Amino acid sequence: MDQHEDPFYVGYQPVAPKHLARETRTAVLGVIVMALGTGAALAWSAPREDPGVFEFGHPRQLIGRLQETPYPSLLVPADSERQRVYTRYLLVQPGKFGAQAATLGLDGQWVTVTGQRIARPGAEMLEITAPGIVPATEPDSALPQLGQTALGRRTYHGEVVDSKCWLGVMRPATGNVHRGCAYRCLSGGIPPLLMTRNPEGRTEHLLLTDADGRQAHQRFKGLVGRPVTVSGPVFQEGDLLVMRVEQMGLGK
Amino acid sequence: MSAFYRAVNWNRQKYIFDGLLAATVLGYLGLFISLSLGQDSNATLETALIRGLGSGALVLLTVILAVGPLARLDRRFVPLLYNRRHLGVAMFLLALGHASFAVIQFHALGDVNPVVSLLTGGADFHDPATFPFEWLGLAGLVILALMAATSHDFWLATLTAPVWKGLHMLVYPAYVVLVGHVALGSLQQPGPPLPTLLLIASAALVLGLQLFAGWRERGLDRQQASVAAEGWIAVCDASEIREGRARMALVSGERIAVFRYEGRISCVSNVCQHQNGPLGEGKIVDGCITCPWHGYQYLPDSGQSPPPFTEKIPTFNVRVIEGRVYVDPRPNLPGTRVEPALINPGGPRRSA
Ligand code: FES
């Protein structure tokens, strides 16, 4: 019997019988269309429009006063037209490291910091890049003395995130997919934030410390990427909310 | 064990196949990344790459697992089997890319080695929301790596067929752990239900096709091989078999293929030594039974591959009485020559 009546094709033969080839082409085309369609649908269903910003490759220089506690930050006097008197930038190092070592002993000093801005509405951060932190002279626009206002003991539900990824470096920066990364970041000294939603649905951030107000990134690293409940006295320091965590637990 | 492995010929079909495969994979990644970046001005290339590579690997794995049963149900898919290992290697490369970028993004530049970080970073089994889904991904990747590294027929010959087949059956556990990896990882994120639905659909497709193809073959087995006479089993009439083709049947729990060629009937095991391909769906080409999957060949009377190849399959004694084909259900040792039965013992015998 010839190939035409009884087509049979094995891949090492140079040419496939015509109508077998045609049928196979249809099947292959079907598979390809389904695969590409799946990819398009998956890409389309990705979470969008996360407001985090990371000005990667565009460092800026800021002059401000360093503050080592509870976590390293730079207080930069604001332009006089703005209502706010200063902007607080949390400071971190490149990679998954906090800026504790880089700011050691500089508390209260005026410095110029070069870094890449990381930001989300309501929170600013600077990833220090070369040449890093250099001394500066105090400008005329002085900063107010920052006092702490006690807001009382509160309980919040939310998720512990590493501030660097959450504020803009990574998407997603929450949940199980990001858990390993957040764990590593907190382990390296990145300040832990509680990401929580207030009754109006707006996202709020609280910087977390231990019950005595000291840095506690190591204590919180096991809690990242899942719903938690934390309780303790909350302090307002300028625009910053800090909770001295006395109790923490899993779940809502 | 074979002393040789068959040289892979790079013919035009193979180039077309690989060209199409490469174009599809690149098209998938291009489409995925441009859609991800296009719809979200803040999206990052790394995340789009990680998602694109990972989802592409799983889509390709689904295709690979679906092609086997599809080929049994519909001959249009048989040519895809021939080069299936190319799909496998491409899928492994996608998975490797996904894993590498994910390890760099989530675990590099930290206070411990990225691999240590991957294996220790907050692993917590108490809760699906914190299950170390990365471990499942890593386990899947290790299996895929083993299979990709041994995909060449050199390894089939070196490891021996049973070991190689066992190794490559690990694709099913790999699929299961990778589905778990996605379900406990990316699907735990808040978002639209579409990815979850797609994962369920893909798993249902793979499982459904396997079950359906198996069920169809069970039906085939039952319908044949019913009449027994003196221990020999009547399989069918010789006239029911097309020239150069076979009829499959189940005798004593073993699948056989009864071939008709040039006025003669021979019977061999239905199972190809290469990768268990269905020889009964093959054809006699150049005097040899030729497997439909990758074209391994066996002489119909002895079940031996023509020299220099050394594969052997069991043969069965066969008779034709008044046009009816009878098979002795006891298999002969692989490679045992059996005199073919003549369909018309008195009639003219065509020369080979
Ligand atoms: S299964 Fe590969 S040639 Fe038969």
Image: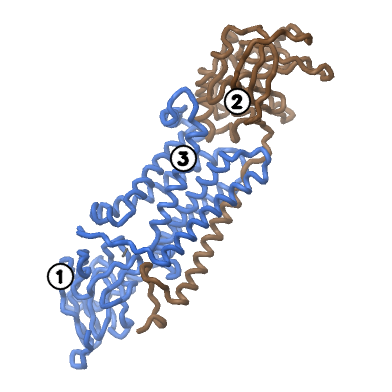
Chain colours: A brown, B blue
Determine the image quadrant of residue A246.
Answer: top right
Marks 3 and 2 close (CB-CB < 8 Å): no
The residue at 37%/45% (across/down) is B145
Please say if B4 is above or below B230. Answer: above
Mark pair 3, 2: CA separation? 23 Å
B314 displayed left or right of A7: left
Eye-nearest disc, 1 or 2? 2
Task: Look at the numbered disc 3 and give the secondary structure of its residue.
Answer: helix
Can residue A230 be seen? no
> Type of residue at label 1?
Thr
A5 displayed left or right of B328: right
Which residue is tagged 1? Answer: B336
Chain name for mark 3 = B
The residue at 25%/66% (across/down) is B254
> Type of residue at label 3?
Ala
Q: Position of residue A22 (x, y in %)?
A: 49, 73
